Image (spheres, grey):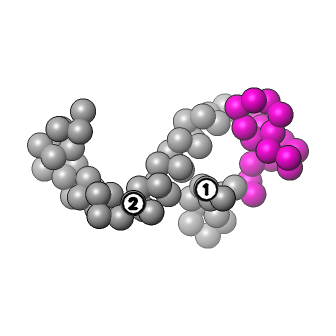
Amino acid sequence: SDFFLKADPELLPSAEKFAADSDLLAEKFGTAYHKLTHNGLDRCGLSGHGCGRGLDCSHKINERTGQYKSS
């Protein structure tokens, strides 16, 4: 739960950083969510219809940072 983010001295700095910067939280959450929902998949999107660019999701990953692009 959220309580443990504040109670754990190792997690607290990250929790405070995300609390102060909602854009950073959205970026990191988007990357993690994309990894979780695409684990083992070779297509973009959970519907199986892709995202309009065929089966490749690489256009959604920032080549420089490796982070998922939310838009």
Q: Which residue is mark 1?
A: 70
Residue at figure coordinates x 83%, y 34% from the top left = 49
Q: How many marks?
A: 2
Residue at figure coordinates x 50%, y 57% from the top left = 27
Q: Quadrant of residue 3?
A: top left
Magenta highlight range: 42-59
SS for tag 2?
helix
Residue at figure coordinates x 26%, y 53% from the top left = 15
Check if residue 53 falls in the magenta segment.
yes
- In the displayed structure, 21 sits above or below 6; it is below
Residue at figure coordinates x 61%, y 70% from the top left = 64
17 left or right of 3 in image: right
Q: Residue 10: tell me if it is visible.
A: no
Q: Quadrant of the C terminus?
A: bottom right
Q: Quadrant of residue 8?
A: top left
Residue 10: x and y, percent? Answer: 18, 50
SS for tag 1?
loop
2 left or right of 35 in image: left
Q: 9 or 46, which is in the foreground? A: 46
Residue 13: x and y, percent? Answer: 21, 58
Q: Which residue is mark 2?
A: 22
Residue type, numbered disc 1 = Ser
